[in-house]
Image (cartoon, rainbow, N blue to C red):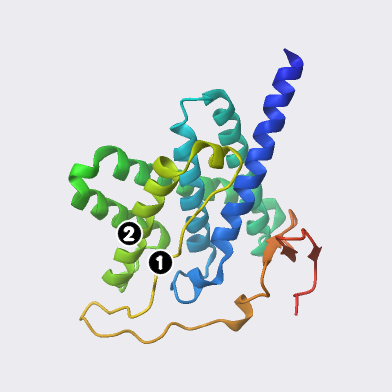
Amino acid sequence: MHTKKIQEKSDSFFCLQRLNIITYVALLLSIWYNEGRIGRQFRPRHAMLTLHVWLLHKRLLADTNDPHSSLLIQEELFDILWNNTRARIRAEGVNELTVNKHLKDVQQITFQQCTHLDHAFSNFDTTSFEKRSEEIAAAIWMHILLKDEEAYNDHIRRLTAYVEYQFANIVHHLPEEFFREGRIGWGNIPDFSNMIDNEGNPMDDATIFEDDWLPENWTRAITEAGETYYWDIKTSQSQWERPA
């Protein structure tokens, strides 16, 4: 019995590690914060992370084959989210004595975002597609775009379509064996080209931050102390210096 529990825990950690890596790769692609026009501040970046963690959480909740293992993975998934959040808070340069207070504040807005998304998909099924899309759009405007009164409707529509697609993709269509092995096909990031403003005029090109772009397979990561380092997802090589 004890051996079985250890094996279950080991299996859940393996699956979690794969899911976590793929999630971060999906989130750290520079296009979100360049062409995608997502804010570069802490809150919008955390909201994008929360969105993708929520999608994995919903898939785990839907698991009827092995709910016990799914529960273990869910618990560890959120533990990793909070540990990563604490590290990102430190990276903001806050006083160490206030880190846990800031973490509690971020946890609160995280649960609010998840509850908002739950409401959109639980209260409005596919027969109420328009109402559900409106609720998803409201969640995006509130949590990712931070209630920006100058947000563009075209931008929100494209982000809404992405959430709808990923919900169907991850929760309903991804084969169980792929999910258990951590092989998550997140699909394409939305096409943000040829966007129009709220008057129907073509928008200027988004500001591109060249420093965001790294060599192939490289991404930024962060230590528990909030220090940035660079990691090659293919070779697992890591280093402090920005790769050339």
> Left or right: where does residue 128 sit relative to residue 138?
left
Q: Residue at x 32, y 84 (%)?
A: 203
For the residues labelled 1 and 2, the Cα–Cα distance comes to 8 Å
Q: Is residue 228 visible?
A: no
- Badge 1 amino acid: Pro
Which residue is located at x 28 percent, y 79 percent? Answer: 196
On screen, residue 50 versus residue 172, left or right, reads right
Residue type of the residue flagged with mark 2: Ala
Residue 145 location (% of width, % of height): 39, 65
Q: Does 150 sit above or below residue 12?
A: below
Q: Quadrant of residue 173?
A: top left
List the residue tagged with mark 1.
190
Residue displayed at 75% across by 75% down: 242
Disc 2: which residue: 161
Quadrant of the rendering where the C terminus is positioned: bottom right
Instruction: Indicate the secondary structure of the residue bearing disc 1.
Output: loop
In this orientation, which residue lies closer to the viewer: 213 or 120?
213
Q: Earlier in the sequence, mark 1 or mark 2?
A: 2
Label 1 close to label 2 by CB (< 8 Å)? yes
User: Which x, y percent locates residue 18?
Assistant: 64, 46
